[in-house]
Image (cartoon, grey):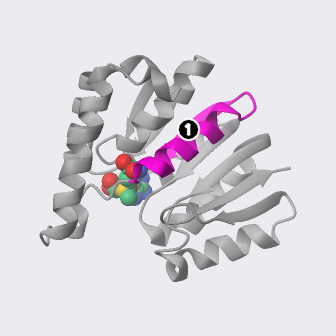
């Protein structure tokens, strides 16, 4: 997958990485920042997604579409479309620009609005990347968990750098008999839940 990244996608990745780096250092307000994953997390989630069972790919929190570009590599391999949810209009605009310039419109459905409302319509989730506001992780877990297929994977980002905020969700998943869970210390910490 990784050697199939097009020049256009690679250019857009570099551009967003640069904006994200500047945002983090110059005091840009939190909600205006891209707050995107680093490349090693991108590789990790795309590898996991590529090996999931048959079903829907879902991403909660698109921002400018950086993580979606990584996931599109797996979607391309599986010949499916990712459903990625974003609530903020400014981010939706940037994401549309990303999907157009990276040439991945064929593999992405950008769903504009609140996942907690719109996500209720999704069934058969084989892979879910959860990277939204930390306060809604537990609600997202409650919504996604019963909609997952056997052997489906949910990955929650920020399990290390926002440990305290997402602990309630991680504790709940650990206690849930339907799941095997593990925190993987890649980058900001990836909490994996496998639906049995
Ligand atoms: C950490 S950023 C996502 C970064 C992105 N995954 C990446 O790595 O490129 C979180 C995003 O989630 C969006 N978000 C927060 N709550 C949401 C909700 N309820 N439904 C959809 N999107 C939401 C925010 O607007 C923000 O753009």
The span shown in magenta is 37-60
Q: Return the residue found at the far bottom.
A: 164
Above or below for 139 versus 36: below
Place of residue 123 in the rendered image (x, y in percent of width and height, measured from the top left): 67, 36
| Above or below: residue 31 compared with residue 37 | below
Residue 156, above or below 61: below
Give the residue at the far front of this rendering. Answer: 3
The residue beneath circle 1 is: 46
The picture places residue 187, in percent across and down from the top left corner, at 49, 62
- Seen from the viewer's position, the closer of residues 142 and 14 is 14
Queried whether the magenta region covers residue 58, the answer comes back as yes
Viewer-side residue, 118 vs 137: 137
**Residue at position x 60%, y 45% from top?**
128
Secondary structure beneath disc 1? helix
User: Which of the 4 image quarters holds residue 30?
Assistant: bottom left
Residue 160 seen in the figure: yes
Determine crowd level at label 1: few under 14, some 14-19, many 20+ residues with C-alpha closer than 10 A.
Answer: many
Q: Quarter-wise, where is residue 64 in the image?
A: top left
Asked if the residue at label 1 sits under 8 Å from ligand 1, the reply is no
Decide if residue 118 is in sight here: no
Q: Taking the image as four quarters, which one is ligand 1 found in?
A: bottom left
Residue 48 lies, in percent from the top left, at: 65, 41
| Residue drawn at point x = 55 percent, y = 60 percent | 186
Which residue is pictured at 57% across the width and 46% down the height? 44
Q: Residue at x 69, y 37 (%)?
A: 126
Residue 55 magenta-highlighted: yes
* Numbered-mark total: 1
**Side of 55 where 35 appears, left or right:** left
């Amino acid at each position: 997958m990784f050697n199939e990244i097009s020049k256009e996608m690679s250019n857009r990745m570099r551009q967003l990485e640069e904006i994200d780096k500047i945002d983090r250092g110059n005091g840009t307000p939190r909600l205006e920042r891209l707050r995107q994953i680093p490349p090693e997390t991108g590789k990790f989630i795309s590898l996991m997604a590529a090996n999931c069972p048959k079903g829907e790919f879902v991403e909660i929190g698109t921002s400018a579409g950086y993580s979606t570009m990584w996931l599109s590599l797996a979607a391309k391999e599986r010949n499916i479309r990712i459903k990625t949810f974003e609530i903020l209009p400014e981010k939706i605009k940037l994401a549309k620009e990303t999907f157009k310039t990276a040439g991945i419109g064929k593999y992405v459905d950008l769903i504009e609005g609140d996942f907690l409302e719109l996500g209720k319509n999704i069934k058969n989730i084989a892979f879910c990347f959860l990277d939204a506001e930390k306060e809604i992780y537990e609600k997202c877990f409650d919504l996604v968990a019963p909609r997952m297929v056997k052997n489906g994977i949910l990955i929650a980002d920020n399990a290390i750098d926002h440990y305290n905020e997402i602990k309630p969700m991680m504790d709940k998943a650990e206690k849930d008999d339907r799941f095997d869970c593990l925190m993987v210390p890649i980058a900001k910490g990836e909490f994996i839940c496998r639906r049995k």
